[in-house]
Amino acid sequence: MIRASVMSRTLVRLFGVFLLLTTLGAWSFRRQFAVANACLPSRLSAPESSSIDKEHPALQAIMTGTSPYRSHKYLYVRVFGDGTVEYHNTRDIDLTKPIPLVTKKLAQEDMTELMTLLRLPSIQKLSGTFEREDMGDVREALDVEIYRDSEVQQLSLVNFHNDRNAPGRPPYTVETVRLGCVIDRLGERAKSSDWQSGECKNLPKVN
């Protein structure tokens, strides 16, 4: 009986320690998540913030993310006709400074791929909002603007990086996925990365 009582108290203590560590771990994760998001700007002025002399970009994408902790908004990628690309570097964050606007030059083959895609009639017809399911309690919206002479084509890709369509919402078409994949690839190339999602890797090439 005494041995059983001691074992019982030991189990109770271990369970209490487990609950304490779980609580502290969850609190620490929430705090880190909130601090990381706190450094992202809540507002961003789009074409006016460009370092290029009053030239409209060929394409621009603004990322807006929302979670229970904070909303954030930043320049995902902005591409100009001469191959110049701009983006906010969210991978190297200094909490004491604003997110830097990085300017680089894309390879000619990347620009050719983008401009060829933007000229496709199926891409020119895209508009409105395409939506997939939220990723847990995180929601991402990529607001895309394509500049065509005096007109601006606008569309939103919600939760593009999730692969499950949201019930009752317009599904992602092949053309929408293709555009999202090119935007992703240009953003990664600007960061000297060749990463692609599995969905983008398996996408049929345009003839």
Image (cartoon, rainbow, N blue to C red):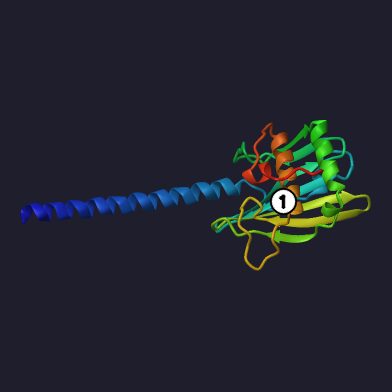
Q: Give the quarter of the figure containing the N terminus.
A: bottom left
- Total labels: the figure holds 1
- The structure residue drawn at horizontal position 70% and vertical position 45%, both measured from the top left corner, is 203
Q: From this viewpoint, which residue is outermost toward the bottom?
A: 168
Instruction: Give the quarter of the image for residue 173.
Output: bottom right
Viewer-side residue, 94 vs 118:
118
Which residue corresponds to mark 1? 177
Instruction: Give the quarter of the image for residue 159.
Output: bottom right
Image spot of residue 7 (x, y percent): 14, 52
Q: Give the quarter of the figure containing the C terminus.
A: top right
Asked if one can make out residue 59 in the rendered structure from this viewpoint, the answer is: yes
Asked if one can make out residue 48 in the rendered structure from this viewpoint, the answer is: no
What amino acid is found at the position of numbered circle 1 in the picture?
Answer: Val
Left or right: where does residue 171 sit relative to residue 27?
A: right
Query: How busy is the neighbourhood of tag 1: few (under 14 within 10 Å), some, or many (20 plus)?
Result: some
Secondary structure under tag 1 reads helix
**Relative height, residue 136 to residue 186 (above, below):** below
Image spot of residue 65 (x, y percent): 64, 54
